[in-house]
Image (cartoon, rainbow, N blue to C red):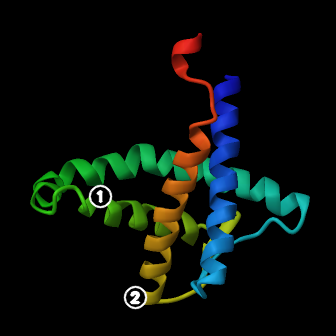
């Protein structure tokens, strides 16, 4: 249970760090952690994002297997961006402020950054084999 909470916190830090980078790139992905209420809302939003990735993301990736094969797996990046866009539309701690194509670009870049930062920070987490 402790590892799950730790991974949840690392994902929240990844979302916040991605919002800082996208803000510097003038993209419309924002995370609100200016108060304790905002930070708690971000943790709830990250839990919703994880749930959507585990359900909707898996279903979409299964349905689009032929397209992923044709693009050598790169289409899964688009699905990750769409799932992040859906989660951000719920406005639970993070949101996308742009509209249209700029919103998708913001979601795409943010999802890449979240995956990268989460992967880098995940190296420092204990393995599941250590139980």
Mark 1 lies on residue: 76
The image shows residue 51, relative to residue 2, as above or below, that is below
Residue 23's quadrant in the figure? bottom right
Question: Mark 1 near mark 2, Cβ–Cβ under 8 Å?
Answer: no
Q: Is residue 13 above or below residue 10?
A: below
Left or right of residue 52, residue 35 in this image? right
- Residue 17's disc number: none
Residue at horizontal 26 percent and vertical 51 percent from the top:
61
| Mark closest to the chain's N terminus, 1 or 2 | 1
Q: Is residue 14 above or below residue 123?
A: below
Where residue 51 sits in the image (x, y, percent)? 51, 45
Residue designated by label 2: 101
User: In the picture provided, is 70 more to the left or to the right than 16?
Assistant: left
Disc 1 element: helix
What crowding class fits label 2: few (fewer than 14 Cα within 10 Å), some (14-19), or many (20 or more)? few
| Residue beneath the point at 63% across and 60% down | 15
The quadrant the N terminus occupies is top right
Give whichever of 116, 38 is nearer the camera: 116
- Cα distance in 3D space between marks 1 and 2: 18 Å
Q: How many marks?
A: 2
Above or below for 107 versus 83: below
């Amino acid at each position: 249970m402790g590892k799950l909470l730790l991974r949840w916190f690392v994902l929240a830090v990844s979302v916040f760090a991605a919002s800082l980078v996208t803000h510097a790139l003038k993209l419309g992905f924002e995370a609100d952690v200016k108060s304790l209420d905002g930070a708690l809302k971000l943790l709830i939003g990250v839990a919703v994002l994880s749930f959507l990735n585990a359900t909707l993301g898996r279903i979409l990736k299964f349905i689009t297997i032929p397209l992923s094969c044709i693009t050598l797996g790169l289409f899964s990046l688009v699905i990750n961006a769409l799932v992040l866009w859906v989660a951000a539309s719920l406005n639970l701690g993070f949101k996308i402020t742009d509209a249209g194509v700029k919103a998708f670009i913001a979601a795409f870049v943010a999802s890449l950054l979240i995956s990268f930062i989460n992967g880098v920070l995940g190296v420092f987490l204990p393995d599941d084999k250590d139980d």
